[in-house]
Image (cartoon, rainbow, N blue to C red):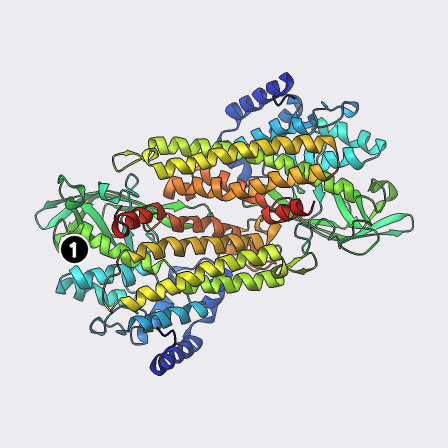
Amino acid sequence: MNLEFSEEMVMLQDSMLKFLQNEYDFETRQSLSRTGIGYSEDNWQNFAEMGLLGIPFEEDFGGFGFGQTGLIVVMEAIGKGLVVEPYLASVILGGLLIQRAGNTDQKEAILPALIAGELKLAFAYVERQSRYNLTDVEFTAEKKAGQYCLSGSKSVVLNAETADKIIVSARTSGDNFTQQGISLFIVDKNTAGLTSRDYETVDGLRASELSFDNVMVEQNALVGELDNAFSAIEYVIDAAAAATCAEGVGVVTELRGKTVEYLKTRKQFDQPIGNFQVLQHRCVDMFMTEEQMRSLSYLAAIKVTEGDGVERTKSVSAAKVYLGDARSIVGEQAAQLHGGIGVTDELDVAHYVKRLTMINALFGDRDYHLQRFSQA
Amino acid sequence: MDLNYSPEEKAFQLEVREFLKENYPKDIQEKVAKGIALKKEDYVRWQKILAAKDGWVAPGWPAEYGGPGWTPVQKYIFDEECGAANCLRTVAFGLVMLAPVLMKFGTAEQREKYLGDILNSDVWWCQGYSEPNSGSDLASLQTKAEKQGDHYIVNGSKTWTTHGHYADMMFTLVRTSQEDRKQKGISFLLIDMNAPGVTTTPIVTIDGMHVVNQIFLENVKVPVENLVGKEGDGWTIAKSLLMHERTYIAQVPRSKRQIARLKELASKERYNGKPLIEDDAFKAKISAVEIELMALEMTNMRVLSKLSSGDAPGSESSLLKVKGTEVQQAITALLMEAVGYFGMPYVKESMTDGWQEEPIGPEEASVLAPHYFDWRKSSIYGGSNEIQKNIMAKAVLGL
């Protein structure tokens, strides 16, 4: 047993942290988030050069083969820097889905380009009525004259605005709420009949509502087997949830650090407020949550790497439940302990709190994962 | 013990209900229901309607000052009916906070000068208490008022000033002398927001909105007749005022209305092909908040039943503040959770008047996460909940 990062991962971590330190202060992040496409294309190319975009992919397609555990390092850093570039949407959701379900032609056409920073993906799986249930797919794909006709809507599609291709889940057979009968299709963003309504998210990222009005695609747009995409979807949502938990660890580490620092410098009643035991204990609660989250994030990454099954389900859901707890133990408390300044737009703390809160809902909230764990 | 209203109280309840039905403007009701930011003119319009009805805008005021002179039970009924009708809450600064202070500590001239304009919402007040370096430790405040002839010269800064940009006047705590005990050098002063040397700077909060401000005071000349009470009385006055504020921020009727809103939303949202409200986990969470609120309501009624009209509330107000804000915050969290992914889109324009576009996901979903974040302030303002617990530990438990 060895739970330390490999030498390569440590190097990766160092270069990520250096990047954040030199080029990603909070003001820079805020101006990226609030203008244009919501992130920097230069940074994205920089990520490609640093090799970040190839971390989880097989070496056959130009990746580094670090798998899910390699993502821990990247995502913790993304959390620490509140990075707005579409890593989660494009590399993790889009790329891992192609790696898992795509055929060799699709992998060859997509993964090297993705790793080189030349192509971006988005994954459309949420529907207006679906909430967190991945089998609730009303979006349809019908076979018509050798093509597929896609119709329906998808919601809160992360970074669809700047994606070149959208992967979309569709019901091709079977009743709703059944796993059987769900398929995946990959569609060029500029295909006729595909329209998008793009918006900012509360935590400073970008997402879109997508509408498919009888979008016709060729048979080779099918990703994976017809009707049998559910296990790939479940896998990629677990992988993304585990990665998000690593991001949450980064966010929580920053919030804990900033709060402790504030308590050491803010004086009231003629002393640093960190002298007050009731506040010390809150910080210790934050610290313990952070360490437990880190443990569950590592465990989830290991289990995602090991493959499908009940252990993956349980470890990912456990990590996600802890992330949900961190919303109050770390997020709400960080704002509270900063007092008024903690709920201003000006201070970075508020933005870490917002990210921590929003990723609770991503890929299923605390209640969903608690239930999923108990039923696994 | 009897929870039932007397026939007179029942008749009063009906009268209030009818009045609100007839007179509460529909456009304001709609904004409140949707969680849209309210403007000063909305408040003024509604408050003037209430004022014109025998001073209903000021439920706590005795008849001699133009209030309705209600009993605690009548005030409770009024508050409850306003909550049920989704009424815009009146702004507390003048009506609920300053007015009782002027009645208790002010001169006849001050009462004459200010109370009528407060009642009619013709003069708008804000509160200048916190300073950048004096939050929980309010008594350490440094804004100085030096007496020069028939004026005070005021220098310093106040912050978290809600509606400071709307206000004509600000009641402030200032330091008039450097005594050994820092509480003793504090005085209560009324400052004209349009006086030379007063600058108001907006503070944008976590929800992206502007409600609070920082106020800079630079050599502001304030006439000595604007002092309330004597020099050095400020702390005593502040404590009595904050207790009024804390009972006001328990907001039981508002929370009841918010729970009704949560249930409506959870009935409309679908999950696993059924209404979300049928989901066991979600249902249990709603129930847990309802139980907290049920206890809070009864505690609130016990406090009311003890108070004879006109008496200032005691340290019970700390309990009401802590529990009240916890319930409010819990409801904002559940409202956000109810819409799942649709808490994520940030549509700032949808939080203000006149937004006509199609909503993203459930109608009104886009205000729910900002409200959740914004409502974090409630356990910080009015004396943080940690300070309230210190007060209870000391004053109630003798620790």
Mark 1 closeness class: few <14, some 14–19, many ≥20 residues within 10 Å = some
State left or right for residue B306 relative to residue A82.
left
Say which quarter of the image contains residue A157.
Answer: top right
Q: Is residue A280 above or below residue B281?
A: above
Callout 1: residue from which chain?
B
Q: Which residue is rendered at x = 56% and y = 35% of the image? A: A293
Q: Quadrant of residue A300?
A: top right
B283 or B260: which is nearer to us?
B283
Give the residue furthest to the left: B149
**Where residue A201 sits: x, y (%)?**
57, 45
Looking at the rendered image, the quarter that the C terminus of chain B falls into is top left
For the N terminus of chain B, give its image quadrant.
bottom left
- Residue A126, percent from left and from top: 69, 49
Residue A209 in the image: state x and y as whole percent.
Answer: 66, 50
Q: Is residue A177 visible?
A: yes
Question: Is residue B191 visible in this depiction of the protein?
Answer: no
Q: Is residue B330 above or below residue A48?
A: below
Q: Is residue B68 left or right of residue A203?
A: left
Apparent side of residue B71 relative to residue B288 in the rendered image (left or right)? left
Q: Which residue is mark 1?
A: B226
Q: Position of residue A74 (x, y in %)?
A: 61, 28
**Residue at figure coordinates x 40%, y 57% from the top left:** B324
Vertical arrangement, residue A309 with respect to residue B164, above or below: above
Compared across the picture, whether B335 is left or right of A162 comes to left
Which residue is most to the right? A145
Identified by mark 1, the residue type is Asn
Q: Secondary structure at mark 1?
A: helix
Between B191 and A368, the residue placed more toward the observer is A368
**Number of disc labels:** 1
Toward the viewer: A129 or B124? A129
